Image (cartoon, grey):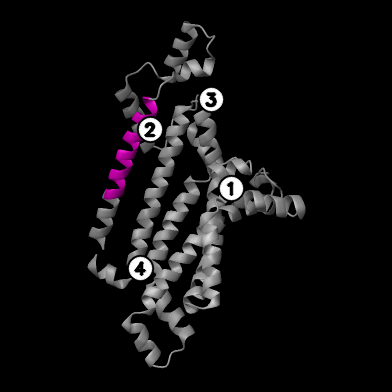
Amino acid sequence: MSIYLIRRLASGLLTLVVASVVIFFVLEILPGDPARLMLGMNATEDAVQALRVQMGLDEGLYARYVQWACGLLSLDFGRSYTYSVPVAELIRERAAVSLPLALIALTLSTVIAIPVGLFAAARRGRMGDTMAMTVSQFGVAVPNFWFALMLVYVFSVWLRLVPAGGFPGWQSGIWPALKALILPALALALPQAAILARVTRSALLEVLGEDFIRTARAKGLTRKATLWRHALGNAMLPVLTILGLQFAFLLAGTVIIENVFYLPGLGRLLVQAINQRDLIVVEGVVMLLVAAVVLINLLVDLSYAFVDPRLRTRA
């Protein structure tokens, strides 16, 4: 198990190093001068040059990468050109919105998808299975921003139960903050729940055809007990894989939803930084999201060994 863990950690670290090189150099070679864009086209050359020195843009490309990479090791992402504050502070403020949003969306997705997948697998070929898979196919086909607009119309404009957008901040209280995140989380969760429900059903149907399931049924276990005690646990590997990918997507892919609901999260910060050509913020946010994806994949790989003892023995 320790060798397996060391290999996964080494793979994750190598991924982070390669990602840091790609992110930095791809963004740095983009056309346009950040100092010129910040001061405007009418700025004098002396003013532009002074700002370039202040921002460290007068140094060599490789020297700037080494300085930036060394800062990442101490969680120092640099200082934003636009906001004149440390990038780590901006990320911390925006992550307080994006991280709870992703966790709530993942929880809703799991709570919806697992029972639907169980329901469909237990009624394979019947009306219930057909209806569940039809609804899930609709959820897969429709983009999340359409769900967002429909939810705003129904629950904010028509029923007036929750706000249509904005975020009051956690200092306003837990309930007002959660109330502002309910609709965005639901808009994110519905398409992901549709995908997860279909994966759960397929995994369960594959397991239900195994010999040990027939043996359990021959010993007198009911279909429901066999499904819950034996089939679900053995079908969790593909479900865990999708859950890990979904959480990474929900954390990194909230750009559209955060803009629809006007939430001050990481996705909105990334869009603003790109528009303002604030490269140090873009590099920091993207690198953080890559690190989050690598960490989530590592946790999913480790969870395999706990779910399936055979993998733990092989490791």
Along the polypeptide, which appears first: circle 2 or circle 1?
A: 2
Q: What residue do we see at 43% from left, 83% from top?
A: 226
Q: Nearer the viewer, residue 298 or 40?
A: 40
Residue 82: image tag: 3
Nearer to me, 309 or 134:
134
| Quadrant of residue 165 within the rendered picture | top right
Q: Looking at the image, is 109 positioned above or below residue 148?
A: below
Marks 1,4: beta carbons within 8 A: no
Give the quadrant of the C terminus: bottom left
Main SS of residues in magenta? helix
Q: Inspect the image, locate mark 3, and give the three-letter code of the amino acid beneath it.
A: Thr
Q: Which residues are magenta?
A: 11-29
Whether label 2 touches label 3, CB < 8 Å: no
Query: Label 2 vs label 4: CA separation?
Result: 35 Å
Q: Quadrant of the N terminus?
A: bottom left
Q: Which residue is identified by label 2?
A: 71
| Label 2: element kind | helix
- Foreground label between 2 and 1: 1
| Residue at numbered disc 1 | 145
Q: Is residue 17 visible?
A: yes
Give whichever of discs 2 and 3 has the lower sequence position: 2
Residue at figure coordinates x 25%, y 70% from the top left: 313
75 w.r.t. 83: above or below: below
- Label 4: few (<14), some (14–19) or many (≥20) C-alpha neighbours in 10 Å: few
Say which mark, if any, is on residue 306: 4
Q: In the image, what residue occupies the spot 62% across and 43% down?
A: 260
For the residue carrying disc 2, how many other residues have a C-alpha within 10 Å: few (<14), some (14-19), or many (20+)? few
Is residue 15 inside the magenta stretch? yes
x then y, percent, for residue 89: 52, 36
Distance between the alpha carbons at the discs numbered 1 and 3? 29 Å
